[in-house]
Image (spheres, rainbow, N blue to C red):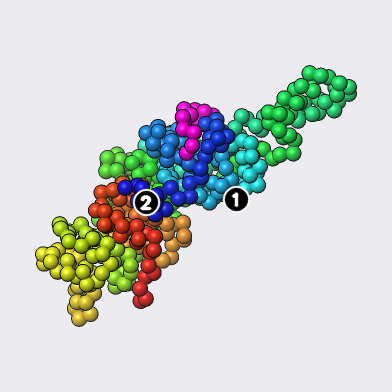
Amino acid sequence: MIDELKSAGLFGAGLVPVSGSLARRYNGCLELLGIAPTVLERFHVDGLGWSPEIAEEKNARHYLNPSEANTHAIIVSPQQEDKPVYYPFHSFDENVMTAVFAAYRREIRDITKDSALCLDIDQFMDSYFEPLDLLRYQKVEVRFQLLHNLQKKQEEQAQLVRQFQEGNHFIDTQLHQALLHSAKTYGDLRHRKLELEPLHLQVRSFYTKAFGGVFLLRDFITDIMVFESEETFKKAIKDTAHDVTLFHIDHAELTTTMVNHVIAQFDIKKAAKTERYERIKKHLFVQKLTEWNHPLDEILDSPFIFKRYLNELDEVTQKELLSVERYNQRKIVERDLNINEVVAPIYSKALLEPHSSLEEDHIDLIWTLLTKRTPIDPLHLYWYDKETFYQQFPKWPESYRKWVIKSVLNPRKPKAS
């Protein structure tokens, strides 16, 4: 079923092919990082240097990570610039790689002609012990190590050249051999910039897969931590030493807090006019169907066939699926109508969206949080939580998978207000 996504360009697109000398350099970086080399001669890597084939070979999704607290990256080709990061451990991983290429684009092109770079993405904690250790995570330092310790070889070559130029050393045959060996092995390193200064990046709000998945939201009224793991949440609430508000991702109170703290907003009249609402309703509709005589993609694309199957569902299910329309229609004349009396709870949760006042980085992070809370919009699932999308995709009926692929490839614009 993943082949369907590959054919549509929804899996593997943007990966850089690696073979030959690049594969050997990649293995050299793995060994430098203390990771067993791959036996694969051909594979692909993303912007971070992560390979789906090697992850499958090692049966370790995040094989580049020495621990939850620190991650590594590998650059073997300048083509990795602007490529997606398929399974980021932190929400800012792709931004880190963007910053690396922005700072050292020319140097990376030069270095990867005959070497590779290993990146240590360090946030000054060797390990996490408690969930609230994440509150100390405020900056990242990216350090660079060249394969074969090329920076050191450059200094050794420079020393040989200086020695050659001193006195009568130019007649020293052993010095000749040393210079020739260095030049043949590493090329002329004298005028290349191989010493890359560490990059320092500030980290504010972010998501990490550590501790089963945690969102840390800063820059709001109070710091907020949202846990995907109930076990980790129960462990975290025992800590009373930190001034932070804690939620499990399924807590109903989280919705109220996000709205009150100007993190998210809910406008059911506006939401009802969006393609996002239509996708969510159709996803829920497919879940309610038990049998059908038409392909699901045909049912979902045809208003006439869709209504026919909708009307065949029991009344309670119809009212649930159409509860948003029913509420907006009744609200026109029933001013005091309570939304909770009409609208299905799943819609009240699923139709939240990031507040319009948020900055772009915060918007993407909040979309990720909202998508993880209610993973029922296939397009947003692909955009903001690919790992769950790839897990769910094979479980859907074949004709629904076709409709999802079309929705992802050709998302339609929201309807006019």
Q: Residues within 10 Å of mark 2 (few under 14, many from 20)?
A: some
Q: Give the label on residue 102, or none.
A: 1
Q: Give the label on residue 347, or none.
A: none
Closest to the camera, between mark 2 and mark 1, is: 2
Q: Is residue 275 left or right of residue 29?
A: left
The magenta span reads 29-43
Kindly identify the residue that appears in the image at 27 percent across and 62 percent down: 297
Where residue 214 sits: x, y (%)? 36, 46
- Which quarter shows the C terminus? bottom left
Q: Is residue 148 left or right of residue 405?
A: right
Residue at the farthest bottom position: 333
Where residue 90 sits: x, y (%)? 43, 45
Kindly identify the residue that appears in the image at 14 percent across and 69 percent down: 311
Does the magenta portion include 37? yes
Find residue 230 and report its image quarter. Answer: top left
Q: Nearer the viewer, residue 291 or 101?
A: 291
Q: Looking at numbered disc 2 in the image, what kind of residue is underneath it?
A: Leu
Where residue 143 sits: x, y (%)? 57, 38
Q: Looking at numbered disc 1 in the image, what kind of residue is underneath it?
A: Ala
Mark 2 highlights which residue? 5
Query: Above or below — where is 381 with respect to 147?
Result: below
Q: CA distance from mark 2 to mark 1?
A: 31 Å
